Structure formats: C-alpha cells, structure tokens
Amino acid sequence: MTAAPLPERLPIFPLTGAMLLPRGYLPLNIFEPRYKEMVEVARSGSGIIGMVQPSQAKISSSLENNDQFGTAERGRPLYDVGCAGLISNFEESNNGQYIIVLTGLRRFKIKKELPKEYQFREVLADYSPYMEDGDDISLFDDEYKDPFIRLLNEYFNAFDIDMDVNEFYDIPHEELVNSMAMICPFEASEKQLLLESPTCKTRVQMMMQLMDFNLRKHDISSDNIIH
C-alpha cells in the first residue's frame, strides 16, 4: 500500500480506545503540548505517527487519568502491537489545536522504546510481521458480507448508532471491515484483539462474535454469528 519505506524510528500516540487499521481513517483532535510537538516533528519528516493503546487502561468517562482529557499518567505500559498512520489532513483551529486525520498504513510490533528526546514517546518499529497489510487480496469470502452487514445493522440499531448500512455493500471488504472495527464501541481490550487479528477474514469473524456477544448481554439475540 505504501511506496516509501516506513520509518523504523516512530513517534507514538498512546490513546485508549482509539484503534487505527490499514486503509482506515482516524480523526484526532490534538491539544496537549507533547502531542502537538509530535505532530510537528512528524510533519517535518515522514508524516507518519504510530497509534498504540496503553495495555492497562479502560475506556472511561472520568476526568481523572483519562487520555481523552489529557490527564492520563505518562510512561504507561503499552501493548506491543500498533498501527502506523500517515497524516493525510491537517488543520489548526482558532484556539491552536491541531485537527488531523491519520490514514492507516501498516501494523507494527514495538521492538523497544527509545530514550526520550522529545516530550512524546518514540519506539523502534518492526513492520515485518505485517507486510500484507493494506494489500489483503484474500479478504473474506463473499458469503460473509451479507451476514456481516445484517449483524452490523442490528448492532447499530441496538446501540442507537445512526448509520445507513445499505451504503456498505459497495465498499471493498478490507476497508469495510477495518473501518467498522475502528468505529464500533468495543472495549479497549476487544479493539486490541481486532487489531492483532492476522487477516481480514479472522478479523470479521471476531467482530461478529463480539457484536453477537454484546447483543446477547443486552438481551438482544442474533442468529447471524459465524463460528
């Protein structure tokens, strides 16, 4: 998917509940000084940032120790798999915040974290386990697409997510699955499982299991699950 080599030295943005996947698009509102510096440094070079989740954090609405409000503790342990994304859109708001969109390129494993040179964290990234990312020609069988979209519709209705699934039929499989994995309100640990799924086919199978499980938790049954 990418013609230019991906940088081994990679600035990372640890953010609980925010998952980026190849061919996915992740909008971000950057307001903390350390991450504004990260965006500036990235834009002066490759334009690439690594998204990774802290490994011991949960999605929360609390104002304390929360990524969304810039109150999370620094230096937290991280999952060892993330996804590199290109800053494909950049705007600066009137109050000095950066509004960016990351386009997912390829997943990576963290080989090691580097000594701090900036306010933000950097790692050495190993992309070799994920060389097929963004070029998944195997995809998942056509027989999965209809039940997957039907289950998405049921899931969205149950959780009051306003989205017209009829538009999904024309979206390429990999783009559809990865985009929905990013959008659906799964737990942080569930999102990490989806991120680390080896292929598009295994990812869609896991997504269907997660959606079915969450529907059953809310006393809404589904017969669309594929085991």
Image: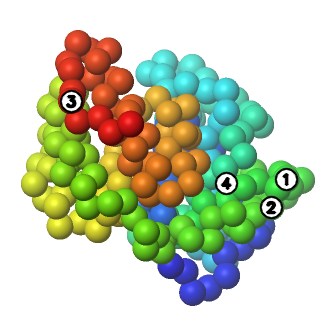
In this rendering, the label closer to the viewer, 3 or 4: 3
Separation of disc 2 and disc 1 at Cα?
6 Å
**Residue with the mark numbered 1:** 112
201 left or right, relative to 2: left
The residue sitting at the right extreme is: 115
The residue type indicated by label 1 comes to Lys
**Residue with the mark numbered 3:** 223
**Which numbered dot is residue 124?**
2
Q: Nearer the viewer, residue 175 or 117?
A: 175
82 left or right, relative to 96: right
Q: Residue at x 21, y 30 (%)?
A: 223
Labels 1 and 4: the sequence-earlier one: 4
- Helix, strand or loop status at disc 2: strand
- Helix, strand or loop status at disc 4: strand
Q: Residue at x 50, y 33 (%)?
A: 190
The residue type indicated by label 3 comes to Asp
Question: Could you say where residue 195 lies in the image, as x and y percent from the top left?
Answer: 53, 48
Question: Could you say where residue 208 lies in the image, as x and y percent from the top left?
Answer: 34, 38
Q: Is residue 52 visible in the rendered structure shown here?
A: yes
In this rendering, the label closer to the viewer, 1 or 4: 1
**Residue with the mark numbered 4:** 12
Labels 3 and 4: the sequence-earlier one: 4
Q: Are marks 2 and 1 in contact (CB under 8 Å)?
A: yes
In this rendering, the label closer to the viewer, 4 or 2: 2
Separation of disc 4 and disc 2 at Cα?
10 Å
Q: Are marks 1 and 4 in contact (CB under 8 Å)?
A: no
Separation of disc 3 and disc 2 at Cα?
44 Å
